[in-house]
Amino acid sequence: MKKFLYLVTLILLVTSCKETANKEIAQVEEEQAYFDWSAANVYFLLTDRFNNGDRSNDSLIKRNEKTGKLRGFNGGDFAGIIQKIDDGYFTDLGVDAIWLTPIWEQIHGGVDEGTGYSYAFHGYWAKDWTAVEPSYGTLEEFKTLVKKAHDKDIRILLDVVINHTGPVTKQDPLWPEEWVRTGPSCTYQDQETAVTCTLTNNLPDLRTDSTQEVELPAILIEKWKKEGRYDQEIKELDQFFTTTGLKKTPTNYLIKWVTDYARETGVDGFRIDTVKHVEESVWATFNEQARLAYNGWKKNHPEETIHDDEFFILGELYGYEVSGGRVYPFSDVEVDYFDAGYDALINFGFKNHAVANYKELFKRYDGFRRKLLKENPNSEAYFMNYISSHDDGQPFDVSRVKTIESATKLLLTPGMTQIYYGDEIARPLIIEGTHGDATLRSQMEWTHNNPEVLKHWQLLGKYRSNHVAVGAGEHFSLEHDGNGTLAARFYDKNNHRDIVLIGAGLDNGKLEIDVKKVFPKATRLRNAYTAKKLPVVNGKVTVMVENGVVLLEQW
């Protein structure tokens, strides 16, 4: 009988422990499910350089000319990204959204830009916006990618460029004059000389300023007929222009073709390239149509919809710094692109500001956030920070000698974050034999010697993803003797409350922290960096600092 009672007691004890553990897991999962774009952790990758999951599509288009180093197609594709989604790679990094370079069909030929013969592996030289680049996969594969990401609570941002076509080559004729201009070159003296111009030689500029209705380019008509989809494309165009009432200008054709990807695939937003090279009135129409297209997808796919967010518009406005507030200052006019429908802009200033110490950096960026909110209380104060990117030749840590510091500063600073593929493993940004931006676009290294660096990025990324307060909370510096900083972040919006206490740049070893002002009722906390649960004694906890970091959370 005693044995029986002991067994029952043991079962009840085990059951109770399991229930407690399940409640704790459920609590964390609830935190993970809450999302706010203003705190998003975005992973930016070049599809061709990330992972080759299907070698059968590597040579569907013959691009056999010898190229400069890192200027040809390397085989990365949708299948490779899907593999890493399935493997949990992005989830382990705490990634909330994946930003992919443009996926539509690229020019078939190549050009020599003085830096070696180049093909359009990067995705920014469009040939046909209505077709997917065969080297990446198919539209159906991309839809699968989006769904796989959504199943992991990861959003997808699709890169968009509408201000130019690809270069002219033997395989890729020049579009008609009423569609594109081939000069003058942009001189950036004022807004007009940044818009009504070409970015570089042999990069035809779409006439985004044109109000003239135009016929389709013969090269597209011929292509669509050869592919057996001319009638369908014309039917969809007629329906679009009838429904929207828009004129058949070059810009409005592009708007239809690009917003189709929101309408047909369910991507959660666009990252828009070269914002300042297009009139803000065009962006207002484009962004409105993008949101309408996405709402149409949600209406037609209720079972696949994972959130009620509006379609998200992120802009690349070269030279924009959050320190300037909402506006971008041309020499003759200040333009507020947020008024044209943008939700966020990439912040080009972070890499320079990140040289500051942690306390100064965090306080400064909380000040930027507060300033944006003050300028427009309805704004979410969106800006996205980065330490490296595909075309920034002066990243924060070009030699990759400050990899731990890079992660800590990027992932714990207020605002959205952009991880550029390979930041998390210290992928080299200096590649011998390359010229220009090719050095920034090397192949992702899946066998590397930086597991501790990757672990650091993962721990900070997961903490950030679990706690919206890290990126979007009110920031308060705490008293601290010694190196580094301690700070609390408080988030209370949309019936969601989150509180964290972070430490960065601290001396490694044991540290006693007074937590009464941050967690007044807590009896225990958890350091997410070491996964240690800590008792709160007289309002204080003793933590073990590793890599200068403490990530306290309620538990």
Image (cartoon, grey):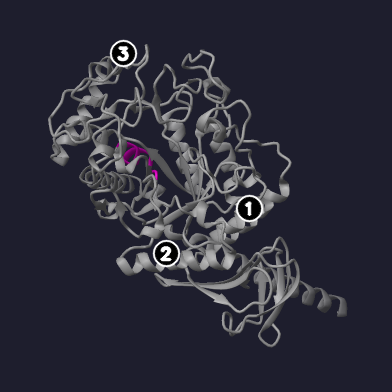
* Marks 2/3: CA–CA distance: 53 Å
Give the number of callouts: 3
**Residue at 41% from the left image edge and 34% from the top image edge:** 102
**61 versus 75 height, above or below:** above
Q: Earlier in the sequence, mark 2 or mark 3?
A: 3
Residue 262 lies in the magenta-colored region: yes
**Residue at 27% from the left image edge and 48% from the top image edge:** 331
Residue 442 lies in the magenta-colored region: no
- Secondary element at image label 3: helix
- Secondary element at image label 1: helix
- Nearer mark to the viewer, of 2 and 3: 2
- Nearer mark to the viewer, of 1 and 2: 2
- Nearer mark to the viewer, of 3 and 1: 1
For the residue carrying disc 3, how many other residues have a C-alpha within 10 Å: few (<14), some (14-19), or many (20+)?
A: few
User: What amino acid type should be assigned to the residue bearing mark 3?
Assistant: Lys
Q: Nearer the viewer, residue 21 or 343?
A: 343
* Marks 1/2: CA–CA distance: 25 Å
Q: Position of residue 367 (x, y in %)?
A: 44, 68
State the mark number for residue 457. Answer: 1
State the mark number for residue 226. Answer: 3
- Secondary element at image label 2: helix
Picture quadrant where residue 195 is located: top left
**Residue at 42% from the left image edge and 16% from the top image edge:** 109
Q: Nearer the viewer, residue 72 or 140?
A: 72
Q: Position of residue 66 (x, y in %)?
A: 54, 14
Q: Which residues are magenta?
A: 260-267
User: What amino acid type should be assigned to the residue bearing mark 1?
Assistant: Trp
Q: Residue furthest bottom?
A: 538
User: What amino acid type should be assigned to the residue bearing mark 2?
Assistant: Phe
Instruction: Please say whether residue 41 is visible from this viewpoint.
Output: no
